[in-house]
Amino acid sequence: MALDRIDFALLARLQDAARTSNKELAGMVGLAPSTCFERVRRLERTVIRGYRAQLDPLALGLGIQAMISVRLRHHAQHASDAFVAHLDTLPEVVGFFSIGGEIDFLVHVAVEDVAALQDLAQRGFTDREEVDRITTSLVFEHRQVGYPVPR
């Protein structure tokens, strides 16, 4: 599906403020509200993965965030699949990247305190058979800025 400048403008606005009304979106891009509504629905079927509320981790009692670099012991697909399935079971996992290079996964976690981070590192990572080594780095600040949208 080819996207045009109006689609890009809609995507940029929705990424910045997903709760923007259809009427406001239509006015911003110069479309009739009904046409804008149909375009957004088409984008939801093809480009937009979903809408989410951004939560304040401190308000949830999550005072520590960390990035855990993980190197797997074996690089077989079953080991990677097992590790990803395990990550899906950990409520502390905010997100992760499967990457190439020295490490295989970069996992973003949020926990209550240092003791919870230590427990998670042991229980969630080093105790896993497929994990060779981890390195934990504390996150001092995190901002979700979104993907660059062509203009």
Image: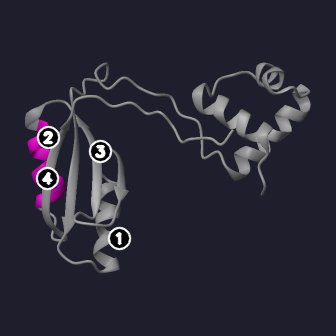
Lower position in the chain sequence, tag 1 or tag 3: 1
Q: Amino acid at mark 3?
A: His
Query: Nearest the camera: 118 or 103?
Result: 103
In which quadrant of the rendered image does the N terminus lie? bottom right
Q: What separation in Å lies between label 3 and label 4 (alpha carbons)?
A: 12 Å
Q: What separation in Å lies between label 2 and label 1 (alpha carbons)?
A: 24 Å
Question: Mark 3 touching mark 2, by CB under 8 A?
Answer: no
Lower position in the chain sequence, tag 4 or tag 2: 2
Residue 116 in percent (x, y) is at 13, 37
Query: Nearest the camera: 50 or 88?
Result: 50
Q: Which residue lies most toward the front here?
A: 151
23 vs 64, left or right, is: right
Magenta residues span 116-126
Q: Is residue 124 magenta?
A: yes
- Which corner quadrant of the image does residue 12 belong to? top right
Residue placed under numbered mark 2 in the picture: 117
Q: How is the image coloured?
A: one colour
Residue placed under numbered mark 1 in the picture: 81
Q: What separation in Å lies between label 4 and label 2 (alpha carbons)?
A: 12 Å
Q: Report the magenta stretch's main SS.
A: helix
9 vs 147, left or right, is: right
Q: Secondary structure at mark 4?
A: strand
In which quadrant of the rendered image does the C terminus lie? top right
Foreground label between 4 and 2: 4
Residue 55 in percent (x, y) is at 41, 26
Lower position in the chain sequence, tag 3 or tag 2: 3
Residue placed under numbered mark 3 in the picture: 108
- Residue beneath the point at 29% across and 59% down: 105
**Residue 135 numbered tag:** 4
Q: Amino acid at mark 1?
A: Asp
Lower position in the chain sequence, tag 3 or tag 4: 3
- Residue beneath the point at 77% across and 40% down: 5
